[in-house]
Image (cartoon, grey):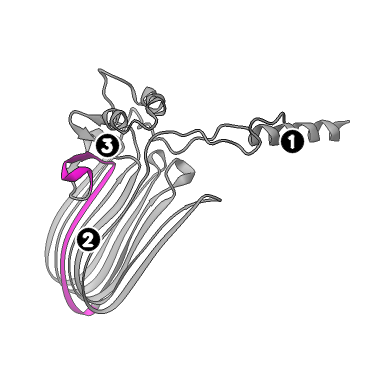
Amino acid sequence: MKGVAVAAVLLAAAFIGCCSIALANPPLVPPVQYEQFCENQKVSGTGVIDVSTSIIDKKIALEYYNVMSGDGDLELDQEHAYSQNADKLKRNITSVNGGNKSGLNLFENTKLTYSGVTPLVGGKYLHSKSFYGGIGADIQEMFAVTEMEKEQTSFFTSTTPYNPCCTTPEDLVKQLKDAGRDTDAVEALMSTGGVYNPAHLIGIDTKNTFNGTWGTDAKWHKIFYKDIKAHEMFTGQFEAEKLIKFHENPVPEREHAPCEGIDC
């Protein structure tokens, strides 16, 4: 009898899963006790280089790594800004929101010049983790160069805006679902104080001149649903301008189960 009862529970769970309502990835609600990190640096000189930054935050589905090492002449002007509350981090990005201010969870800008006999080796990894409510997209940059001039911006957003006179972050997700295909209504909900929040968004925008090897990998995968991959690798003397950007409309969507309408 015990085995029959267990089998019945498993069967019921299977039917519930079959006919349950699945939602797309709405923007994440930022924590009330939000956290921030800011770093600005300007470095110029000759010698050994060892630079690394990593930011991992499960609450906003963010995974970020940026590393490089070498031995040569370096000029570096770099900013890292991270905030769980995107309303507190506003930046103008040419490829986002028409170049107007956007609310972001992560912003990174690098201006770099390097020359040396020893290659400058490094890479960058930016990931919106689906397990924690992100969209499952990631972008990776890799390089090993003896000469490089680079200007690059990285950006990431996954959380809701907050406008206390109109709605709370928790209520906003429900209102986005009601807005549905009305893109103007969605944009109004995702804007506060004239600043648009583009969640979910992940991207890198770069201008690059180099002698050596440089490349990028980008992919967006959803099991049984989506698989997007883009790979580029160059070795030699090149000039490159590249934008990689993944964006998902923040509106939750009801997905119809195959058994819907059938008496399970």
Q: In this view, does 242 lie to the left or right of 4?
A: left
Horizontal and vertical percent for residue 168?
A: 33, 22
- Residue found 18% across the figure and 28% down from its top: 193
Q: Nearer the viewer, residue 207 or 31?
A: 207
- For residue 197, the mark is 3
Q: Nearer the viewer, residue 193 or 48?
A: 193
Residue that mark 2 sits on? 206
- Toward the right, the furthest residue is 1
- Residue found 19% across the figure and 44% down from its top: 98
Task: Specify the principal SS of the magenta part.
Answer: strand
Q: In this view, does 217 lie to the left or right of 22?
A: left
Q: Which amino acid does label 1 sit on?
A: Leu
* Neighbourhood count class around disc 1 (C-alpha, 10 Å): few under 14, some 14–19, many 20 upward: few
Residue 148 sits inside the magenta stretch: no
| Magenta segment | 96-118
- Residue found 24% across the figure and 75% down from its top: 145
Compare marks 3 and 2 and give the one earlier in the sequence: 3
Horizontal and vertical percent for residue 1?
A: 89, 30
Compare marks 1 and 3 and give the one earlier in the sequence: 1
- Residue found 34% across the figure and 69% down from its top: 232
- For residue 10, the mark is 1
Q: Is residue 102 left or right of residue 4?
A: left
